[in-house]
Amino acid sequence: MREASHSWSEQEFKSQYVRYYRALVVYVLKAIADENAAQDIVQEVFLNILRLKRTFRDELQLRSYLYASARNKALDYLKHLNVEQTFISKVKDGTSCYAITASGEEEFFTEEVYRRLFELVDALPPRQRDVFVKLMEGKKLHEIAEEMNVSFETVRTQKARGLSVLRKHMNPEMAVVLISLIG
């Protein structure tokens, strides 16, 4: 391993990636049962190390970080999947509404608004996306701060930044749905 003050060399990063990649994919796969998503999650964990320029004191600290990050990202994935499944079940139950014009065309339908809203939320930077997914699950800001192990102010800031981005791309129907989802 390396000293905490040094940055990752390309060779060292590749070595650690090769060493832990398969084990982490299997670890995540046990939780989410989707191999492609598990691979994406593990790749995102390693990308975060590079992006955040993380340093580690020793092998144990690296391993702890990798497994904890993979677990947290798997849980976030499952929570997001739960939000989508809840929406899908509402659609199947017929609790969504359609507006049909005289010509028989669907003028406005809630499903399209939700779909577009989820696309916009998914496109947010990771921290903002995580905050919005948790808000859409009905969690309060202080609960999210506790779960993400960040300050209340950080969550509030991420929510405000995310809202700013989302407002630029939302139509009025989407704004109403978003407000109803995040309270």
Image (tube, grey):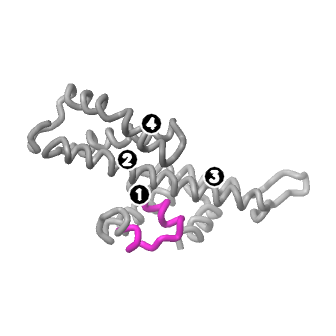
Q: Earlier in the sequence, mark 4 or mark 1?
A: 4
* CA gap, disc 3 and disc 4: 24 Å
Task: Identify the magenta region.
Answer: 131-145
Q: Which residue is mark 4?
A: 39
Q: Residues within 10 Å of mark 1 (few under 14, many from 20)?
A: many
Which is nearer the eye, 115 or 133? 133
**Residue pushed farthest top?**
11
Q: Which residue is mark 2?
A: 70
Q: Earlier in the sequence, mark 4 or mark 2?
A: 4
The picture places residue 63, in percent across and down from the top left corner, at 26, 44
Q: Residue 53 occupies which quadrant of the picture? A: top left
Query: Badges 3 and 4: C-beta atoms under 8 Å apart?
Result: no
* CA gap, disc 4 and disc 1: 22 Å
Number of marks drawn: 4
Query: Badges 4 and 1: C-beta atoms under 8 Å apart?
Result: no
Q: Which mark is residue 115?
A: 3
Q: Earlier in the sequence, mark 1 or mark 3?
A: 3
Q: Is residue 30 magenta?
A: no
Element marked by disc 2: helix
Q: Which mark is residue 128?
A: 1
- Give the vertical position of 120 relative to 29 (above or below): below
Q: Locate the N terminus by quadrant.
A: top left
Q: Earlier in the sequence, mark 3 or mark 2?
A: 2
